[in-house]
Image (cartoon, rainbow, N blue to C red):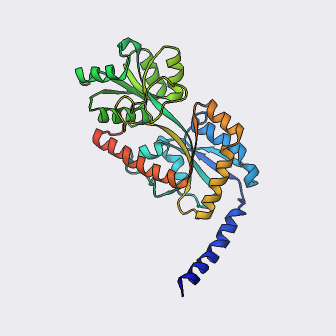
Amino acid sequence: MTPTRRAALAALLVLPSAARAASWSPDRPVRIVVPYPPGGPTDILARALAAALPEAWRQPVVVENRPGAGSSIGTEVVARAAPDGTTLLLAATAHVMNPPLMPRLPFDPVRDFTPLLNCAFHPMVLVVHPATGITDMAGFVAAARARPGGLTMGSAGIGNASHLAMALFAQVAGIALTHVPFSGAAPAQAALLGGQVQGGFLNSTVAVPQLRAGALRGLAVADARRWRELPDLPTLAEAGYAGAEAGSWYGLLAPAGLAPALAARLHADLLAALRRPEVQARILAAGLDPLETGPEEFQAQIAQEAAKWAKVVREGGIRPD
């Protein structure tokens, strides 16, 4: 068979699949699994999208909260689901942070999922209590080097994003910090506000109101660019610590094995829903920045971050509770 005839035959084989995907309509309600409790950013984003999708799919879209085990319970539900487009996962950064901390997870964050759309993000912010007298990054690093381990940094728990952000920054800056884990974000924030710990990495949605009230002092945004809510706060890269970026992304995944044409259709429909004004408004109101990261770039990001956080855990000797 000549190359021309072979190419023509391949095109004929692809056309029916593409046509089926273009006319795809699920035969039952679509569920978006959120591996966290109701009320958080992941849940808010999932519900905003779920309200915008039935018009395209002609089926109800339901949000199913399956929290527990650091998001692994709900994630496993999707990893084991049929790759037919009717079960999606609204994942967050824990998707790539958990595996090195939980080596017996029954799924692989890269191999067992089909990325569709990374749709929102917010960075972490390095903050200190005003009583420290530290006013900028130079002062923070100087204090840490003058007394290795003398600065106490609170987090929401061992292996939490706030802990791993701190560990990454310490490795990049070449400093020693004392980690003080708490049993959740609320007690960690209370200890920071009360001065029981001197600093920490907070999600921007939590940090912004405290910084505006003067209860905490911001030193840097852990992102490659300045944060829209804190335009006067420099980035860690601007302070000389490129590579210490840490934040929370929120993206949609399907089970592995999803047909490429169907993945493209789902991506297009999800992107159209994401761009609706009411969805954008809810994302911004939740303190997130909308993203439109497509499947290939999102796949590369997941693989890159899985390797990045595995290295942080390994070099930091971090062990889960």
Place of residue 40 in the rendered image (x, y in percent of width and height, measured from the top left):
58, 34
Along the horizontal axis of the image, is 100 left or right of 287?
Answer: left
The residue positioned 62% from the left and 72% from the top of the image is: 14
Where does the N terminus fall, quadrant-wise?
bottom right
The residue positioned 46% from the left and 31% from the top of the image is: 124
Of residues 75 and 206, the one nearer the viewer is 206
**Extreme residue in the bottom direction:** 1
Place of residue 65 in the rendered image (x, y in percent of width and height, measured from the top left):
60, 42
Q: Is residue 308 above or below residue 13?
A: above
Place of residue 139 in the rendered image (x, y in percent of width and height, measured from the top left):
32, 19
The residue positioned 67% from the left and 52% from the top of the image is: 269
Q: Is residue 30 visible?
A: yes
Place of residue 102 in the rendered image (x, y in percent of width and height, measured from the top left):
39, 46
Where does the C terminus fall, quadrant-wise?
top left
Along the horizontal axis of the image, is 272 left or right of 227?
Answer: right
Q: Is residue 147 visible?
A: no
Of residues 278 and 7, the one nearer the viewer is 7
Of residues 218 and 224, the one nearer the viewer is 224
Q: Is residue 264 above or below residue 61?
A: below
